[in-house]
Amino acid sequence: MADRPALDEDARARGRELALEARRRRAEIKRFLADGGSVREVIAMRDHDPAVARMKARDLVEACPGIGPTRAGRILAQCRVAESRRLRGLGEHQVSALISALEGAGPERGRLLVLSGPSGVGKSSVVAQLRAQRPDLVFSVSATTRAPRAGEVDGVHYRFVDHPGFESMIARGQLLEWAEFAGQLYGTPAEPVEEALAAGKDVLLEIELQGARQVRDSAPGAIRVFLAPPSWEVLVERLQGRRTESAEVIERRLATARVELAAEGEFDHTVVNASVEEAAAAILGLLDQAAPVAAP
Ligand code: 5GP
């Protein structure tokens, strides 16, 4: 192999120095953006600052406060900017789209996840797993007229109310959705859900089918997941094994479950509950891909 000219070593050292300098400069720009600095100003610097010119558009977007990788991907797609595009390669339209998307961004609203499925499919276990894995997920506490089961705490598992109390919530428009299930009333109080979404928190509703249908109309951006049993036999076994209800109640729930299973196709996604951990992981994957729900 021929000897490299001595000059090459110097050139390489200089190259390394320049690269280091450019990285330092980009880190500075990112801090400026994270502190609320103007996106417009940064993009304008590309004309005289080579480090800024070589900065990736994705890095610029992700450096803005409150923007994580998923949201950054959505903003780039919405502004028609390729993932690998550098600031020097942005066209005029892309620049103005990015500026308006980022300067008007504000805190992102949360996402609404609706989990439904037949009685006995294991919704509560999956919900417990979801909450353990994602403690910042807000679980909507439903109002219900049914009596508390052993271990259920008012305000934690449900808000236990009497019939007149529930009816006054309906009359005042305080429920996002409500339904009658196995002879009792169940409903989602609207205000806590809206407050959490507005604060950028993701919200989980664990509700039955009629309620899920109402949410489809009242919150079109919600992501609706149907939790299915591995088979009908497994579902019957689980319902009979619970032994917290009378034979008559179990029979009624099985009849409802048959109808509910037939509604699977109305949902955005089906997740089979073969194992609680896998079902929860699949649901979180769906949640992470979802877009925020629009303001009412
Ligand atoms: P359980 O009595 O076993 O706690 O709940 C019975 C059914 O009511 C379950 O399918 C549960 O998902 C549903 N449910 C619980 N809360 C609500 C609610 O706020 N709205 C609706 N529509 N269904 C609910």
Image (spheres, grey):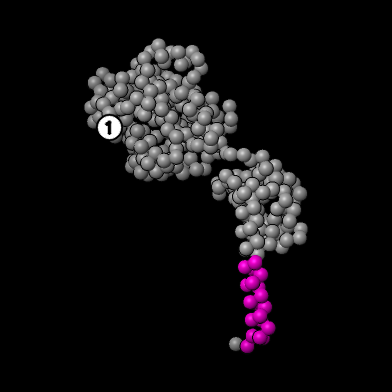
Tell me if I can see residue 241 in this picture.
yes
Tell me if I can see residue 210 in this picture.
no
Q: Kindly identify which residue carries mark 1.
A: 238
* Residue plotted at (35% across, 44% down): 277
* Residue plotted at (45% across, 13% down): 168
Q: Nearer the viewer, residue 73 or 152?
A: 152
Based on the displayed image, in which of its 4 quarters is residue 234 positioned?
top left
Q: Is mark 1 within 8 Å of ligand 1?
A: no
- 30 lies left or right of 130: right
Q: Quadrant of the C terminus?
A: top right
What is the x, y in percent for residue 64?
61, 48
What is the secondary structure assignment of the residue under circle 1?
A: helix
Q: Quadrant of the N terminus?
A: bottom right
- 100 lies left or right of 117: right
* Residue plotted at (50% across, 43% down): 288
Find the residue positioned furthest to the top: 164
What is the x, y in percent for residue 283?
43, 40
Based on the displayed image, in which of its 4 quarters is residue 231 positioned?
top left
Q: Is residue 109 above or below residue 146?
A: below
What is the x, y in percent for residue 106?
62, 39
Q: Is residue 246 magenta?
A: no
* Residue plotted at (72% across, 51% down): 41
Q: Is residue 10 magenta?
A: yes
Q: Amino acid at mark 1?
A: Arg
Magenta span covers which residues?
A: 3-21
Count of picture labels: 1
Main SS of residues in magenta: helix
